[in-house]
Amino acid sequence: MADLLAHSPPLPIIIYYGNPEPFDEQGDVEGIRLALQHRERVCRINLHLPFPSLRKVFKSMDGPFPALETLQLYCSSYRNENARIPTTFEAPNLRHLQLSDFTFFPPLRTNPLTAAICPQSLVTFSLGEAPPTEHWTPALFAECLEGMPQIRCLKIGYLFPVEGSHFGQASEGVPTVLLSDLEELHFQGDSDYFEALAARITAPSLKKLSITFTNISSRPSLEKLARLIDESKILRFKFARVKFKYNFSIVMDHSELWTGRGAFELIFDVRSSWRSLDRENELVSKICDALDPMLPKVQSLLLEHAQARDSSKWNTNPERERVVMWRGLLRRFENVETLRVADRLVDELDRLLELDAGDKGSVGSLLPQLKTIVWYDPEPDGIDGADGSDDVDGADDSDDDGADDSDDDGADGSDDIDLNAGTGINDTNVIKPCKERFKAFVEARTAVFQPVEVVRSSKSCLSLD
């Protein structure tokens, strides 16, 4: 390796090693350290190593790397023990920085992300799988971002809830950092932490926003998220997808959403808290308030329930509260022209709209611009009544989901409400023939000169990922 480096032309050097196992002490470590001696040629470093190996490699990074543009460091050990970048390390032209956590930096009393490690040339900063720490407050993080005026993509992730009930206490009236070039913001972690961080930044050029809350308080606030959305006039989309699958998510994009990813993603991945909160109405209301500037722009809405059979019921509220929740959600999508419905929500939305059809005074106020309802059959076309006959649609799907859920309910001693009893929006004992789906609503809308077309499609046309 030494001879190869010494006699090779002065071409850029890329150092990549992704072995999470312990190093060959005499081979791999020495090869990387030899390559790091050619600092003026090293343009990219990507290391995925346990902390003992990283600690040895870092000893050769104790100086300037003028050509380095990309630095990616990932500690594969459960805990990083004293594997830290030397204080003498410099990368004045660094553009992309990706770290597994902040423990790579020396313990300084002041801001550890100094100009030497995070210069003003930085355009991408990714912090993934960071362990919880009380020292990295949202205020300190905002201070770090102030030194990145050209940042375009910011990704922050926490593996566990970050302890610190003080996060939201000092967020009102605090100075904000203007990130005028920030186009992408990805966050995964505690909702209170995000709110406290969002209170300290302004990003008017946001084009892509992906938020996953893995932990939310009993009374979550989305006020600062709403401000970020309102300030960025670019975050306005034509297509939206609302999904229930262990969690609750809203995804939006400029193109039809056949997959689960979009330019805007808001995901509540809080499986334990979702059930203990049991306040869907309150949470949905806050979500709608936060997304208020975006929802009226949506013209095509997909509603999907892709719950696994062994999961807890997400709809534990009785009928009246469910009706309130759905109407509150749908009224925000006032300009939707196409409503697409899949899975269990076909029957639930059919009953909701049937109840609405009975109120002649308000039948045209819910989704007033609606022109088409597309509902997705769980079976391919040509099977299970696809010819318009009175065969019961979705019987197999009902057996798979309804029977298993009925057997599982209450097995853990919980107080789930049996929504399969009685009549109304949650009455799934009686499954309508295919041609009867949404019939009452269509007839009521026709009577007020707001016709709606119903289209049946195969679920195989829909990508439920």
Image (cartoon, rainbow, N blue to C red):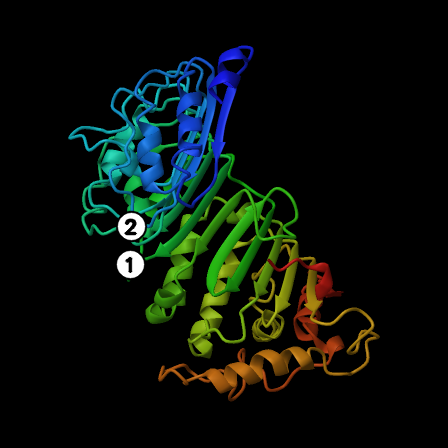
Location of residue 39 by image quarter: top left
| Residue at the spot 19% in from the left edge and 33% down from the top edge | 107
Q: Earlier in the sequence, mark 2 or mark 1?
A: 2
To which residue does mark 1 refer? 217
Point out the image quarter for the C terminus.
bottom right
- Where residue 420 appears, x then y in whole percent? 52, 85
Circle 2 residues within 10 Å: few <14, some 14–19, many ≥20: many
| Residue at the spot 54% in from the left edge and 82% down from the top edge | 404
- In whole angstroms, how far apart are the C-alphas of marks 2 and 1? 7 Å
Location of residue 253 by image quarter: top right
Q: Is residue 14 above or below residue 250?
A: above
- Where residue 257 appears, x then y in whole percent? 63, 50
To which residue does mark 2 refer? 192
Residue 370 vs residue 463, the one in the foreground: 463
| Residue at the spot 67% in from the left edge and 66% down from the top edge | 445
Identity of the amino acid at label 1?
Ser
Location of residue 436 by image quarter: bottom right
Q: Is residue 363 above or below residue 419?
A: above
The answer to whether the residues at label 2 and label 1 have Cβ atoms under 8 Å apart is: yes
